[in-house]
Image (cartoon, rainbow, N blue to C red):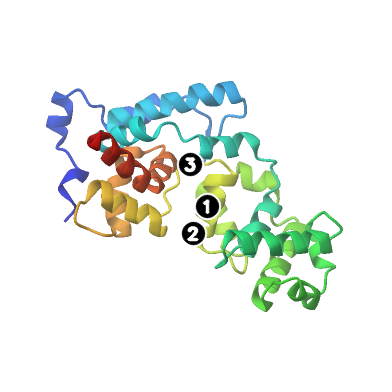
Amino acid sequence: LFCCSCAMPRSIRKALGVRTVKAAKAAASSSRTKGGIRLRQNSPSASSTHVNTVLKQLSDEDEVLSDVIKVVGPPTSLTSRWTDQAGDAFLSLVKSITSQQLSGKAAATIFSRVEAGCNGRITPLSIINTDKEVLRSMGLSYRKAEYLKDLAGKFQSGELTDQKLRSSSTEEVMASLLKVKGLGEWSVHMFQIFHLGCENVLPVGDLAVKKGAAALYCKGKKIVTPKELEHIANKWDPYKSYGSWYMWQANKYLELKRSSEDT
């Protein structure tokens, strides 16, 4: 059973003039896609227009999310990363591995040490040429040093490249990166959302997204299950990355709502 606010009978939705998921997909079909991956717009102006279209579609489709969007505003911290992204997939994945189970400050310190040890530029070859013990002396665990070596080897051999990752479907990217030691489903989902700019990724293993969904859609529950999250997110398709971002903002939304009610 799913929480009652997660679903609305089709007949009622039609009577209220709310578009179905099928209609939403049709309206979005003009966006560039390849094998299930929805790619970001490269032009900042096009991106702004596109994001407005996405938010309108999500608002039409999901009444709960519509109010969150109105209160929190556009997902600028998400879309600005897409616009500013330098495009170095290897470097992004090195940061992902380095930061695992660390605070942001500690991860940044270790990353800067690794960067300095690679003469200011982290590349697959520079990691390959750096001894594991040297990497460990920079603050990396033995396993993380192994993970970086494995990642570097796959990029150096051409098994992984920026082009391959950007032109592959979300499923293909997941399959390719899960072969890298130290990268799990959650890490790949974050890479897909924040680095590749994939617009239809639902990080079902993300604790904050599941807690946010529970707070907004399932009052009384502390966290939703992955299956419940997928059910809620059906209405966000094909823009689940945006819906996920708003789940991360659930606490901010609830605080702003309380503040407005108190005034």
Neighbour tally class for label 2: few under 14, some 14-19, many 20 plus, Cα within 10 Å: some
**Residue occupying image coordinates x 52% and y 39%:** 77
Q: Position of residue 8 (x, y in %)?
A: 16, 38
Q: Which corner quadrant of the image does residue 39 belong to?
A: top right
Q: CA distance from mark 1 to mark 2?
A: 6 Å
Q: CA distance from mark 1 to mark 3?
A: 17 Å
**Residue occupying image coordinates x 74% and y 59%:** 112
Taking the image as shown, residue 135 lies to the left or right of residue 104, namely right
Taking the image as shown, residue 115 lies to the left or right of residue 229, namely right
Q: Which corner quadrant of the image does residue 160 belong to?
A: bottom right
User: Disc 3 marks which residue?
Assistant: 36
Which numbered disc covers residue 186?
A: 2
Whether residue 83 is visible to the viewer of this picture, yes or no, is: yes
| Element class at badge 2 | helix
Whether residue 204 is visible to the viewer of this picture, yes or no, is: no
**Residue occupying image coordinates x 78% and y 78%:** 133
